[in-house]
Amino acid sequence: MRKALMARFAGRIEMPDLSLASDEKLTPGRLRIEVLAGLTVALALVPEAVAFAFVAGVHPLVGLYAAFLVGLITALIGGRPGMISGATGALAVVMVALVAEHGVEYLFATVVLMGILQVIAGVMQWGKFIRLVPHPVMLGFVNGLAIVIFLAQLGQFKVPGTMENTGHGIGGGEWLTGMPLYLMLGLTGLTMLIIWGMPKLTKVVPAPLAGIAVVAALVIGLGLDTPRVGDLASIEGGLPPFHVPMVPLTLETFEIILPYAVILAAIGLIESLLTLNLVGEMTGKRGGASQECIAQGASNIVTGFFGGMGGCAMIGQSMINVKSGARTRISGIVAALFLLSFILFASGLIELIPLAALVGVMFMVVIGTFAWNSLKILAKVPLMDAFVIVLVTVVTVLEDLAVAVVVGVIVSALAYAWNNARRIHAKTYTTPEGAKVYQVQGPLFFGSSDGFAELFKVESDPSAVIVDFADSRVVDQSALQAIEAVAIKYEAAGKQISLRHLSRDCHRLLNKAGHLMVDSDDDPDYELAVDYNVRTGILGGH
């Protein structure tokens, strides 16, 4: 028995796929695509990491080190080849208050604790609950994400050196005007045009990389005066040094960092698992949720001990990677190594790249990410689904991705419960023996328990009543309580009630109450995953 249970449990555990190429054959052509895609992603990571470091109130290298370490570790052991992880804005806006009040050392300690919590979530296989996210929530999520990415790029159209940390991102500052603005817009448009047209000519080089290369060569060759990566900050540095967070090991410290760690861990996992699903839809892959949780946690633990601000999956960069043709772990590893080489050896060259080229790449990501078909189906889908799509989109823009997803799931769950609560009804007929039969139809759970009680006419019913659950399903403790309450009413009226087609678990527990006669001969053999103690009213799981 024990061996059988262990075998069954082992079969449920997701076996990690640590192969570099997954099911793709590692041919020279495939390797070229992966390396070029990784280079494209690395170039796009630099301004993002620097900007998010500014948001969190830390040195740019803290963001770059996080992008390198988180990106490398998750590429090696993550749940989905092709995903890109690094420092993100969703986490940065939470970190800014901690850094402002307690300093960067407390941030490093928080990132370590955040990673531990994420590893625990992976070991406990909590990542599978991402399956509960409905499709309307996913549509709202990607639409809101596209808008957030678009709005984040607008900060690049401000005069470098005048931008301020507003707590929700880089804001304030002076907008470009006149010829600098026209030049920035023109170069951005040229980059987008190249990305759009390049695949029609050749797929030898990823279109985003070609766009960056052509526009950068044009700007550098002609000496055009336009904002560049170096105007944000210098990215020159050394290898990330090992560093134990300098915080007192006291209960007070734990009380300070725990709330932040819980929030960061939750946001990081939600964003990472949704990215995993999104990449999975594009590449035809499934599974890997628990493995991704462990990878995210391990990367944040390491990052916290090497002076990084932590991170999670980056949906925009993941989209660039996948749309550049990457399908294996190699592209993510290459992206991280290129990023490190930029910091160590090529900072001067990378700082010359015009921001307009990188903005153009991200604008194309926006166009490709937004679910344009959702605008067409809003009038065709149920009103509640349309409402959820719009709600999640709006909350994503106004708050953050994690909050929007939680809100969307809650609203969808309440709508589902309400719809099912209205489905409960019963057909009635009288047997030749004079017993009245109630054929209950629809699920019986907390939302429909009141409606279930209203089905019965205790005073006018005959002395024998049969309740048939063949077309129903008893779901939770509220349902069992509702059945018992009806039985008590019939007993008080001196009448007999019997149940049919209940699970054996249900009628065994209800028999303990002493009110019911259960007809077991025609009951089907299926299990109910609840355990209800009629005396105490406690519901537990088997």
Image (spheres, grey):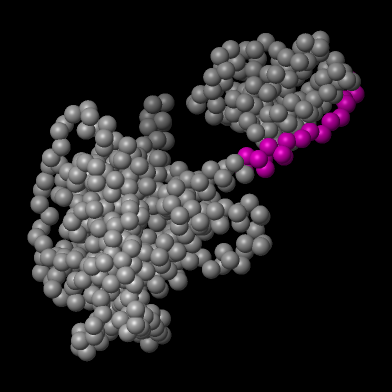
Query: Could you tell whether 278 is left or right of 317 in the image?
Result: right
Magenta span has 50?
A: no
Q: Is residue 113 visible?
A: yes
Q: Is residue 29 visible?
A: no
310 over 249 or under it: above or below: below
Residue drawn at point x = 76 percent, y = 15 percent: 489
368 over 88 or under it: above or below: below
463 over 317 or under it: above or below: above
Query: Could you tell whether 92 is left or right of 370 in the image?
Result: left
Image spot of residue 257 (x, y percent): 26, 37
Image spot of residue 211 (x, y percent): 31, 80
Quarter-wise, where is residue 301 in the image?
A: top left
Residue drawn at point x = 68 percent, y = 29 percent: 449
Residue drawn at point x = 76 percent, y = 35 percent: 425
Image spot of residue 317 (x, y percent): 33, 64
Query: Could you tell whether 399 is left or right of 65 in the image?
Result: right
Query: Which region of the structure is painted magenta?
Result: 416-433
Quarter-wise, where is residue 315 in the image?
A: bottom left
Residue drawn at point x = 19 percent, y = 46 percent: 104
Magenta span has 423?
A: yes
Q: Residue furthest bottom?
A: 222
4 over 127 or under it: above or below: above
